[in-house]
Amino acid sequence: MKVVLQNLTKIFPSRNKKSGEEVVAVNDFNFEIPDGKLIGLLGPSGCGKSTTLYMISGLQKPTNGKIFFGDDDVTELPTEARGVGLVFQNYALYPHMSVKQNILFPLQNLKGKDKMTKEEMLERAVSAAKLVQIDDLMERKPSELSGGQQQRVAIARALVKMPRVLLLDEPLSNLDARLRLQTREEIRRIQKETGITTIFVTHDQEEAMSISDMIVVMKLGVVQQIGAPQDVYDNPVNLFVAKFLGTPPINVFEGRVAGEKLYIGEDAVLSVPGVADQEVYIGIRPEGFELNENGQLHCKLKNVEVMGRDVSIVSSNDASLNSIIRSIINADNKVDLSKEDITFSLKVHKVFIFNKENEERIYFEVN
Amino acid sequence: MEKNNKIMQEHNLQSVSAQQSVLKIVVKAGTYLFLGIMALIVLFPFYWMIISSLKSLEEYRENIPTLWPRVIIWSNYAEAFTEASLGQLFLNTAYVGIVSTLLSLVITVLSAFAFARLEFKGKNVLFAGLLATMMIPGELFTITNYATINQLGWMKTFTVLIVPFLVSVFYIYLLRQNFLQIPNELYLAAKVDGCGDLKYLWKVMVPLALPTLISITILKMMGAWNSYVWPRLVANDDAHRLITNGLRNAFTATTGDVNYPVQMAAVAIVSAPLFLVFIFLRKYIMKGVSRSGIKG
Amino acid sequence: MVDSKQQWKAWLYLSPAIILLLVFTVWPIINTVRLAFLEGYNALEATWGATYNVGIGNFTKVLGFREFKTCLVNTLLLTVLTVPISTILALLIAVALNSIKPLQKFLQTIFFLPYVTNSIAIGMVFAAMFNIIGLRPDGLNADSWGIINNVIMFFGGEPINWINANSGYWANIAVMTVYIVWNALPFKILILLGGLQSINKQYYDAAKVDGTPRRRVFTRITVPLLSPMLAYVFITGFIGGFKEYSSIVGIFGEKMGPVGDPYRLNTMVGYIYQVLPDTDYGVASAAALILFAIILLVTLINMQVSKKRVHY
């Protein structure tokens, strides 16, 4: 089932009556989610990603715009008629019901022609439980389960009525680090097996990048960029997206363009054909540095962290906006720690320049 | 010399700690003695009620009272039952208690749900207004209610004993607080699961708030059982009289030469259901009461 | 979020409560105030079309009644006597209960027992305990002095005519005080013990490390930390005290006084119920408003005091 969001907008009336300022939680969101894909809505807290999810679920009504499931306009449809499954951040399992009762609950609410016999319901519940591998816990109460198990029950409950769209709200945030890795693979597996269009919300870019077919980066209610994770990483449209994606994060410098040359401090680091003279921000991915004694960028060496396959060189430069510059290079390169200075050359496709006023990307020709 | 000193010190320390432990024991013993005496005082009226209800009138009137009946007269109970027509009173009270409790629970649950989970204009103002009425003593309402009842022609009916007290702002408040503790996500999850409001209320909120609902039920039933002033005012006839009022009515004289054993038997019969509730449902009563401060 | 469907659903759910409250709570408040200021309002006359002047006549009339003054004095006296006594006693019992381990639950249950009683019924038991059977006219001899007098005499005291005909006013008040305190203890113990148990044990450990003596621990740690609960118990006690009625009916019967002196122990609430059936609603309303005013005043004073005294 493809999901289409058309000019989707959500405005909350102000909480403070005096100031009367409205809060635009989601502003003019347009997106067509292809059938059977796993989509990650990504952004810092307050960016409107959860609101978007809730609007798709029908728990919140959009102020403007339309939502389609396939060709059906579901904008005015109440939640229960939309056929969505939703997994809440804290799972929202009914504490007084057993795992089985929790999973059965959505089926028991079906009415009319969808109504099922007890046997059918049980069969469906068991197969949903098997899918998430909790079929041996059916008689337990939620309080007797670990966080990861509760998460699986919540997913089973969302899946049991075979929703047209599966929605997950910060599905991994309540799990510890080890479980998180495991569960995100699990979500990917379940999504692949069922083929249900799945949208999940997260503030963790690593999580989103690792399992999504496509990511949507949002900021303050406005969609910044949509694309495959690698594309967005390789080609951020603005400084915000560039900074938000990637660990370790991108290194940002203040610099300028003069005579089609890019300067960091006094170092002319790159030639940027077709770019007018101006002040700019420069973003360089950690893997965009190469050790080169004749390199153009001069930094002060601070430290070297060995990470096995790679080494991470920590240095500093007056033009850097962060206190340190982190560059990752192959461990085969030997770094002389006794030296105070270090020089790099830059990989041109790992360097992005941004307009200083609006922080939009400035593209230059790469030859 | 030094060695001696050390021994002396140790000796001192030992005696100090011995003194302290003696003091501790004395304090403990004193505490238990105090509590024991107070407990006896608290229990004494119940003891006196029971033994008096089992004595013959002659034994009760003896100059030096006996602390246990020489001959146990069970017939006092039968006599009390017929003399005060307790059977009829029991039925009346049970009817009023059950009907008013059930209706009251429905009203309370619906209102608490609206206040806890639904959004509507004027919610906070309305809720504050309700709470404000709790400050006003019930006697202020009685006068007009008495007139209203008169006009409606409800005097001497069961309706008049049930309807005016169906809404308890306090119970609505108590249950709303309980409902608010249930995470809102459950409500949203139920909506996603295709569960309507009333079904959600019945299937999720009511089971989760069951302890509070049980507390409310017990306190409400006890309220019907113990209510005296209003029933006496508006339904003081044989067909509608409630138990407390009936008891007072059957034994008007409290002092002088009264047939106390029978009277005490009647009192014991009236108290028995309360004791049973107390023994089996004490937990719920104490929980409800400690949050309320009202006497049922 | 506020959609119209939720709006009317909410009002639908609330409608039974709101309708009942409008009829039996809101209207009475308005009407009682109205009636209190219609001078000499009488329901029976009003149905015949009598009209009334607006004024404070009902209030001056009520305050002028000797019976009302008796009620006022009785109510104040009983409240002032019973609230401090029961609070202090409850505090002592709660602290004692909190300091023991074995039997704590058992004793706690016993102390809560009087709560689930019927104040009319147990009042009759108290009456039986204080009653004298067959008192001779000279007052020196009787068939049975009653268990309380038996105990007094056992310790060498003189028997007292507590509640019978020709009994003294203060003897009556003493009996009422005992009964009301007995009745009030369970609630207060429950609340105070709950408060004590929620005090962090670390404070006591800290005091122990500092070698604080027992008495100082009580006055400097326990009472201050318990002060919100004490204030709560005090305020509810006062409100309850001003509404005292059925405990007196329990002991003295509906005549509210010993034989030969009816309504000697009548209270404010008792007065309102006494005048109601006479359809003198104006006077009754004025009396109810005076009661409300007193309760409000005392509550406000209490809250003001406890604001200063309650330590956190």
Image: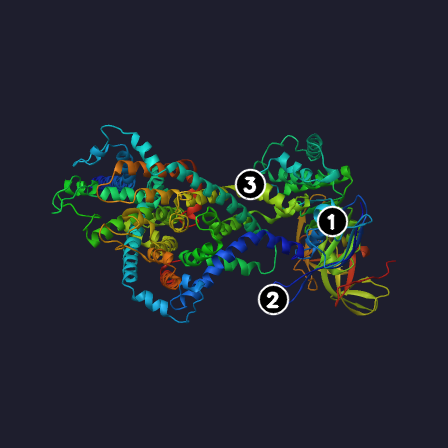
Is disc 2 on the same chain as disc 3?
A: no
Q: Tell me the quadrant of the picture where the N terminus of chain B can be found.
A: top left
Residue C288 point in image, percent of width and height:
38, 61
Q: Secondary structure at mark 3?
A: helix
Residue B55 point in image, percent of width and height:
25, 32
Establish if C151 lies above or below A353.
Answer: above
Disc on the earlier residue, 1 or 2: 2
Query: Are the residues tagged 1 and 2 within 8 Å (C-beta)?
Result: no
Residue C273 point in image, percent of width and height:
36, 55
Mark 3 against mark 2, which lies toward the viewer? 3
Identify the residue under disc 3: B207
Return the chain for callout 2. A
Return the chain for callout 3. B
Disc 3 to disc 1, C-alpha distance:
36 Å
Q: Amino acid at mark 2?
A: Lys
Residue C224 point in image, percent of width and height:
35, 55
Neighbor class of circle 2 (other Cα within 10 Å; few <14, some 14-19, many 20+) is few
Based on the displayed image, in which of its 4 quarters is residue C34 positioned?
bottom left
Which label belongs to residue A17? 2
Q: Amino acid at mark 1?
A: Gly
Mark 1 against mark 2, which lies toward the viewer? 2
Is disc 2 on the same chain as disc 1?
A: yes
Residue at x 44%, y 57% (from the top left corner):
B147
Neighbor class of circle 1 (other Cα within 10 Å; few <14, some 14-19, many 20+) is many
Q: How is the image coloured?
A: rainbow
Position of C97 compared to B180: left or right? left
Closer to us: A132 or B296: B296
Identify the residue under disc 1: A40
